[in-house]
Amino acid sequence: MLLRVNHETKLTYSAPVSETVFEVRMGPMSDEDQTTLGYRLQVAPMAPVTAYRDGFGNRVDLFNLPTPHREVVVNATSFVRTHRRPAQSRLAEVAWPGERPVAVEALEFLGASPLVDESPELDAFRATLTEPSGSVADVVSQVMEGVSRHLKYEKQVTTAKTRVSEALTLGRGVCQDFVHLFLGGCRGLGLPTRYVSGYINQSGELATHAWAQVWASSHANWIDIDPTRQVFANDDYVVTAVGRDYSDVPPNRGLWRGRAEETISVAVTVQPADRMPADWYELGAQAPWPDTAGQFQSQSQSQSQRSGNGSSQAQRQGQGRGNGLSLQGARTGYRHQQSQQQQ
């Protein structure tokens, strides 16, 4: 299936702010289940954009606006062909407890993480799960059923920073919370599981979506599972980033400096397409990764060379393992940008 994804993020300020440092994880990856045919990022006001890979292999686009402004608009457009391998049947072929030892690349996704915190609430949830048996597909289905018993889907009761222990106490949440609880359940069984940020092709109100990937064996590799909808992912799903939990893969993260109030608005469309538009071929779509190691330029960088490199102390300190921007805002005068919760 060929999908066109458009993701617009707009941040507005009640008064001019002096600087913004902004990073996004909106560029879909290419792997065995999907191929990114084109990705373009447009930034207003125009600014040079530096693209790099974080510690999890996700594409990150980073830019700095060093002059006063009252609005920042980021528009990411992608064409992705999905060819997802059958998920449930692949997990059904792996008997529980699965292959041991765990592959090195999966070890990081066995323990606690900032938003999937070890807590009495999580321990109590794990205690309600039935003794795992059968295939890995059976075990995963049991955990999904447990998640659905403990959480009710409801918007605006949690935030992008809500930990799984808090969501369990509330008994409510959105897909982000469902995934965190699923991660906690699977990891408690010794099943490596990671958080997925991306998009889903569905009717109705759209936003960035979240689900999980379970590692069952070196043969099955990573399998996509949506605990919110209680399904194994199909070709309607597009992956943009993976990590330990949401804190590793927010679609946007940033810092800004000024005396103002910030408002965020997000618009996402995902639509099937017959083919890529001719102008994408003529102008050249951005490749998901550079041919050689190192940084590469995005479309908005090539459009805005006259504005200079815009490098600031915040930007220089911002690149790192997974979490990207990590300034302690209180000591530098910067304030943290709002993140868009995944619904």
Image (spheres, grey):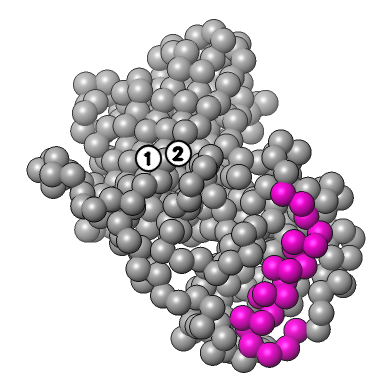
Q: Which stretch appears magenta? A: 132-153
At a point 37% along the width and 40% down the height, the residue shown is 6
Disc nearer the start of the sequence (1/2): 1
Circle 2 sits in a helix, a strand or a loop, which is it?
A: strand
Q: Which residue is mark 2?
A: 268
Which picture quadrant has residue 283? top left
Q: Is residue 217 above or below residue 231?
A: below
Whether 136 is among the magenta residues is yes
Percent from the top left, x then y, of residue 251? 50, 42
- In the image, is residue 342 part of the stretch drawn in magenta? no
Nearer to us in this view, 104 or 266: 266
CB contact under 8 Å: marks 1 and 2: yes
Q: What percent of the width, then of the height, locates residue 276?
A: 21, 49
Residue 160: x %, y % from top left: 66, 41
Q: Residues within 10 Å of mark 1 (few under 14, many from 20)?
A: many
Q: Nearer the viewer, residue 65 or 95?
A: 95
Q: Quadrant of the N terminus?
A: bottom left
Q: Amino acid at mark 1?
A: Asn
Quick one: label 2, few (<14), some, or many (20+) residues within 10 Å?
some
Q: Which amino acid, mark 2?
A: Val
| Picture quadrant of residue 212 | bottom right
In the picture of the structure, the residue carrying the numbered disc 1 is 6
Residue 184 sits in quarter = bottom right
76 left or right of 105 in image: left
Q: Image point 57% across, 86% down: which residue?
A: 92
Determine the residue positioned at 55% across, 82% down.
Answer: 91
